[in-house]
């Protein structure tokens, strides 16, 4: 049996925070505002996996009211959800994702993101697509106020 999930996340860009996307620190003068490290790509991946299993969303599983998730490394949260997927008897077949940011340019960081995430997801990097998009200077993302991400995940029962 196959199950598919869709995930989405957006965070505001602010000064005084590191920019971490896909588990990789990106050189930029601003970072993403959030309770954890605000890694929009990983958060979209988590919601896609939870959605595929018809479970609660990331905010319910890892509430921003819980101090143990303050500035949490999202790769650790992702690993917990991958373990949950595997406990339910599924494995990840493939992932398709987008990072939408007017700046900074994501392309130089995508190979490292794929390396980091493929290990956490227990998949081959060739089964993980990460694409970089802009908003053509439209809306909050296009005006460099935020970064967003979306992801689609296919799970197969073992």
Image (spheres, helix red, strand yellow):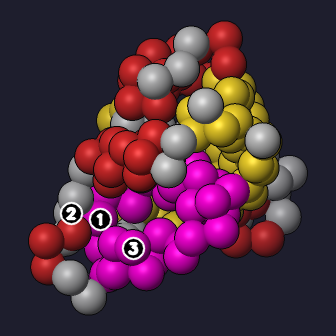
Q: Secondary structure at mark 3?
A: helix
Count of marks, rendered view: 3
Q: Is residue 128 left or right of residue 61?
A: right
**Mark 1 / mark 2, whichever is N-terminal:** 1
Q: Quadrant of the N terminus?
A: top right
Task: Identify the residue shown where x is 61% and y is 31%.
Answer: 158
Whether the magenta-drawn stretch holds residue 45 is answered as yes
Distance of mark 1 from mark 2, alpha carbons?
4 Å
Helix, strand or loop at mark 2: loop
Magenta segment range? 35-64
Q: Nearer the viewer, mark 2 or mark 3?
A: 3
Can residue 144 be seen here? The reply is: no
| Residue 20 pos. (x, y %) | 38, 44
Q: Residue furthest left?
A: 68
Asked which quadrant contains residue 104, the reply is top right
- For the residue pair 156 and 37, the one nearer the viewer reads as 156
Cα distance, mark 1 to mark 3?
13 Å
Give the mark nearest the N terminus, 2 or 3. Answer: 3
From the image, tell me which residue sits under label 2: 71
* Residue at the image position 78 percent from the left and 42 percent from the top: 2
Residue beneath the point at 45% across and 78% down:
59
Local crowd at mark 2 within 10 Å, few (<14), some, or many (≥20)?
A: few
Label number found at residue 61: 3
Q: Nearer the viewer, residue 103 or 45?
A: 45
Q: Position of residue 77 (x, y in %)?
A: 33, 53
- The reply to whether discs 1 and 2 touch (Cβ–Cβ < 8 Å) is yes
């Amino acid at each position: 049996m196959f199950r598919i999930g869709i995930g989405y996340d957006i965070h505001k860009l602010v000064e005084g925070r590191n920019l971490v996307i896909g588990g990789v620190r990106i050189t930029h003068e601003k970072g993403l505002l959030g309770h954890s490290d605000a890694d929009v790509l990983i958060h979209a991946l988590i919601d896609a996996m939870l959605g595929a299993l018809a479970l609660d969303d990331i905010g319910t599983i890892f509430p921003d009211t819980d101090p143990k998730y303050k500035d949490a490394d999202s790769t650790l949260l992702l690993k917990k959800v991958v373990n949950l997927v595997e406990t339910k008897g599924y494995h990840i077949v493939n992932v398709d994702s987008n990072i939408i940011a007017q700046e900074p340019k994501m392309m130089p960081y995508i190979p490292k993101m794929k390396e980091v995430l493929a290990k956490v997801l227990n998949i081959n990097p060739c089964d993980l697509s990460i694409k970089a998009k802009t908003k053509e200077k439209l809306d909050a993302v296009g005006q460099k106020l935020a970064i967003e991400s979306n992801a689609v995940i296919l799970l197969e029962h073992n």
